[in-house]
Image: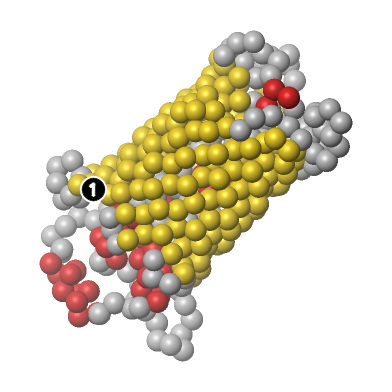
């Protein structure tokens, strides 16, 4: 609920390449000619493992010509191969001017891609220490399914469930769905819709039906630059978030919330660097394609995040992440902030 897990939106460029060829397998002669023409290039896992960043479609064609990542397509009678990614991670949390003092979390994310279908599953455990010596413990489970539709669309749906010692948000469930459209390697746009229900959130006077929160998040992105240049290639995106927790919300959070998000990623050799920033107001927000749900009764006012991914080889990479956010707690007159440091290990087979 505090550590952002980048790249949980739809599928990665490597997975897109596999889905595309499952619909229309490429001309093998042309593909082999592409491979010979690029034989002097050094391909890295940064291109293969860009599932750790958001909407990075600009490497689709590059990955599709990568010998290690383009599967040998089976005959009609053979079974479709399955491609698996496993990602354990851990992080520490530090608060300033907050009722909370510190915390930590750990989790694991996994995905399986077969043909035009992708299945995702994530689990996260969080502990937060409060300055009054109390402690919050929380378990979050997320499951999602994506499917390639036609030649230009991706659809996704899933659910997130929270079990926590926070009485107001315990048992909260988020249902989500989205669709994405892309044009070749240059442009993509999509929208996600989330609905979260907290059955035990009874703070609103005269209301006994819990809290319901709607969120709509459209995005648009474009790639630019030359991967073979000294500065590498780039992907940028802009997003907007509309959140309405008015159904059963307490008076101080009964409002409509608006925010904008910007992201810039750079691919250069074995390194993938992503900077993200957002501004505006959010309460009970959902991020990272449904894998991060902010279930506590707090209002966030903006933040930044930097992640750096380094390829250890074709199948493995490591990533470090640091994020900073500003927020307000209903019973705290001070403006608070939180810093999260995270470490990830990603392995695909």
Q: In this orientation, which residue lies closer to the viewer: 7 or 278?
A: 278
SS at mark 1? Answer: strand
For the point 23% across and 48% down, the residue is 224
Q: Is there any visible trace of residue 313 in the rendered image?
A: no
Residue where numbered disc 1 is placed: 224
Q: Is there any visible trace of residue 241 in the rendered image?
A: yes
The correct choice, above or below, for 335 with respect to 346 in the image is: above
The crowding category of the residue bearing disc 1, from other C-alpha atoms within 10 Å (few below 14, some 14 to 19, many at least 20), is some
Q: In this orientation, which residue lies closer to the viewer: 70 or 264?
A: 264
Name the image colouring: secondary structure
The correct choice, above or below, for 112 with respect to 115 in the image is: above
For the point 61% across and 52% down, the residue is 176
Q: Can you give x and y, in whole percent of width and height, for residue 309 in the image? A: 36, 42
Q: Can you give x and y, in whole percent of width and height, for residue 10 in the image? A: 47, 56
The correct choice, above or below, for 86 with respect to 148 in the image is: above
Quarter of the image for the C terminus: give it. bottom left
Q: Can you give x and y, in whole percent of width and height, for residue 163 in the image? A: 74, 41
For the point 53% across and 33% down, the residue is 258
Q: Can you give x and y, in whole percent of width and height, for residue 19 in the image? A: 41, 69
Q: Is residue 152 left or right of residue 133?
A: left
For the point 40% across and 82% down, the residue is 74
Figure disc tally: 1
Quarter of the image for the N terminus: give it. top right
């Amino acid at each position: 609920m505090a550590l952002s897990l980048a790249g949980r939106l739809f599928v990665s460029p490597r997975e897109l390449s596999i889905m595309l060829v499952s619909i229309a397998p490429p001309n093998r002669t042309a593909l082999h000619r592409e491979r010979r023409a690029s034989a002097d290039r050094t391909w890295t896992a940064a291109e293969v493992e860009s599932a750790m960043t958001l909407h990075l479609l600009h490497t689709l064609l590059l990955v599709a010509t990568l010998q290690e990542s383009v599967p040998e397509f089976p005959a009609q009678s053979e079974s479709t191969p399955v491609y698996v990614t496993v990602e354990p991670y851990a992080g520490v949390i530090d608060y300033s001017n907050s009722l909370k003092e510190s915390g930590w979390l750990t989790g694991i994310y996994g995905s399986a891609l077969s043909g035009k279908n992708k299945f995702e599953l994530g689990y996260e455990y969080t502990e937060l220490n409060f300055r009054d010596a109390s402690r919050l413990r929380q378990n979050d489970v997320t499951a999602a399914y994506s499917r390639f539709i036609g030649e230009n669309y991706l659809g996704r749906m899933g659910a997130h469930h929270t079990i926590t010692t926070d009485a107001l948000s315990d048992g909260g469930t988020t249902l989500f769905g989205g669709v994405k459209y892309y044009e070749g390697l240059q442009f993509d746009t999509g929208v996600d819709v989330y609905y979260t229900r907290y059955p035990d959130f009874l703070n609103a006077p005269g209301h006994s039906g819990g809290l319901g929160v709607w969120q709509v998040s459209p995005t648009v992105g474009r790639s630019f630059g030359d991967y073979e240049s000294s500065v590498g290639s780039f992907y940028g995106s802009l997003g907007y978030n509309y959140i309405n927790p008015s159904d059963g919300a307490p008076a101080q959070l009964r409002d409509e919330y608006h925010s904008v998000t910007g992201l810039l990623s750079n691919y250069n050799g074995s390194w993938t660097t992503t900077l993200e920033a957002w501004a505006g107001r959010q309460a009970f927000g959902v991020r990272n394609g449904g894998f991060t749900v902010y279930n506590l009764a707090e209002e966030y006012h903006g933040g930044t995040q930097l992640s750096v991914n380094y390829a250890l080889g074709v199948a493995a990479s490591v990533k470090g992440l640091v994020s900073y956010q500003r927020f307000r707690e209903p019973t705290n007159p001070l403006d608070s902030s939180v810093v999260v440091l995270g470490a990830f290990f990603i392995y695909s087979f």
